[in-house]
Image (cartoon, rainbow, N blue to C red):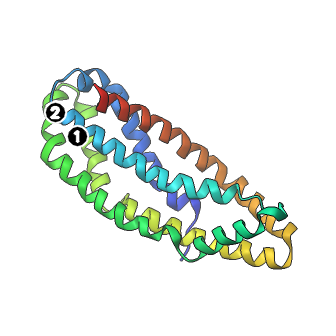
Amino acid sequence: MNISIETITSGFDLVEKLVIVLGKTRQQLLGDPEAARQKLGEVISTLEDHFNGIYEPVATFLALPLDDPACLAENEKKLMAWEGGAIGSLTVKADFSCRQIAQIYQEHLDRWFNRVLRKENQELKDMKDIFNQLSGSDVHFYHLIGQLSYLLQEESSTIRKLLESNQASARAYQLELRRKWMPKLQNCSSLLSDLNRLKLEYYNR
C-alpha cells in the first residue's frame, strides 16, 4: 500500500475551501436567525474533531525524544501502540460522523443555504459541492484516518527497529520525517485554529 502524508492530508484543500466560503458568506449566515445555524456549528465541530484526530498523533510521533535515555521506555510504549494500530479505532467514529454530516446537510443545511444564499450563486454552488464531497467517499475521513493508522504503523515499526540497533539512525530518520511532514502538520494546525473560531461563532450566537 503506497501511502504518504500527502495522501492523508488530501482532505485539507476541501476544508480550506469551506473556511473561505464561510468567510465570504459570514454576514448572511450569522445574520440569519434560522436554527440551522447551530447545525452548521455542529458540522464544524465534527470536522475539528477529525483534524485533531490527525494532528495529535502525528505531532506526538514527530516530537518523541528519541535521544533521551530517560524516555526510552515511554517511547517504546508509544511506538508499539502505534505499530499495533492504536488509532485505528478512530475510523469507526469517523465513519459515523461522515454519515451524520450527510444527514445534517440533507435535513437542515441544504434548504437553509438555498434560502439565505439565493443571491450568492457562486458561493451557493461552492457550498453544495463542498458538502457533497464531505458526505461522499472522495474525501472520506474514515479512509484518511485509516491511512494515517497504517502510515504510523509502518514508520513506528521502522523507528523502533532502528532504536534497537542504532539510536542515532533512529533520530536521523525521525528528523527527516519531521522535515517532510512539518509543512502539512502546520497546515493542519492552522485549519484547527480556523475551525475552532468558526465553531465558536456558530455555536455561541
| Residue drawn at 40 percent across, 66 percent down | 91
- Residue 7 spot, x, y in % from top left: 52, 61
Residue 68 is left or right of residue 32, and the answer is right
Where 27 sits versus 138, above or below? Answer: above
| Residue drawn at 26 percent across, 51 percent down | 101
Q: Disc 1 on helix, strand or loop?
A: helix
Label number found at residue 39 = 1
- Residue 113 spot, x, y in % from top left: 18, 35
Label number found at residue 171 = none
Q: In front here: 145 or 52?
A: 52
Query: How many marks overall?
Result: 2
Residue 32 is left or right of residue 189, and the answer is left
- Residue 20 spot, x, y in % from top left: 40, 33
Q: Quadrant of residue 111?
A: top left
| Residue drawn at 46 percent across, 70 percent down | 88
Q: Is residue 126 visible?
A: no
Query: Looking at the picture, which amino acid does disc 1 mark?
Result: Lys
Q: Disc 2 on helix, strand or loop?
A: loop
Residue 155 is left or right of residue 70, and the answer is left
Residue labelled with disc 2: 35
Residue 4 is left or right of residue 44, and the answer is right
Decide: few, some or many residues near mark 2? Use Cα within 10 Å; few <14, some 14-19, many ≥20: few
Where 141 sits versus 51, above or below? Answer: below
Query: Looking at the picture, which amino acid does disc 2 mark?
Result: Ala
Q: Is residue 104 visible?
A: yes
Q: In front here: 176 or 132?
A: 176
- Residue 12 spot, x, y in % from top left: 47, 48
| Residue drawn at 46 percent across, 35 percent down | 194
Q: In front here: 132 or 51?
A: 51
Q: How far is disc 1 from disc 2 in space, using C-alphas?
A: 7 Å
